[in-house]
Amino acid sequence: MSVIQKFFIASMFMWAIPVAILYGFNNNLFPGTENLSPYSVTLVSGFLAVISVNVVIAFYIYLAMREPAKQHEPDPKFLAEAKASMKPPTSDAPQSSQSQKKEQ
């Protein structure tokens, strides 16, 4: 499965699961919620919704860590250009027009 598909599915679960938990608690769909005060229902449902998002994020990170490392190698041309841009400029190189304007 591609990375984009995994990200889309994880994003949908991060939205759908907390909403389902909040809806279920507020409409007494879970057993035992009818005995709780409204304050307790809000507190417990919010806590479980936050925990569910963290579980989905942890699962997504787990799937990302299992991706094969050799599959995602950077483009050699891009690497060469990036390494060349990291080298300090030589004093023999002509100055650009922007650097000349800054000096004036």
Image (tube, rainbow, N blue to C red):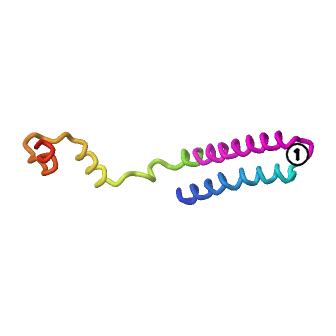
- The residue most toward the front is 104
Which amino acid, mark 1? Thr
The quarter of the picture where the C terminus appears is: top left
In the visual, does 54 lie left or right of 91? Answer: right
The quarter of the picture where the N terminus appears is: bottom right
Q: Which residue is mark 1?
A: 33
Residue 19: x, y in percent?
72, 53
Q: Quadrant of residue 7?
A: bottom right
The one of 20 and 103 positioned closer to us in this rendering: 103
The one of 99 and 58 positioned closer to us in this rendering: 99
Query: Which is the main secondary structure of the residues drawn in magenta?
Result: helix
Label 1 SS? helix
Residue positioned 77% across, 44% down in the render? 45
In the visual, does 33 lie left or right of 52? Answer: right
Residue positioned 30% across, 49% down in the render? 79
In the visual, does 74 lie left or right of 67? Answer: left
Residue 6: x, y in percent?
58, 56
In the visual, does 104 lie left or right of 5? Answer: left
Magenta region, residue range = 32-61
Q: Residues within 10 Å of mark 1 (few under 14, many from 20)?
A: some
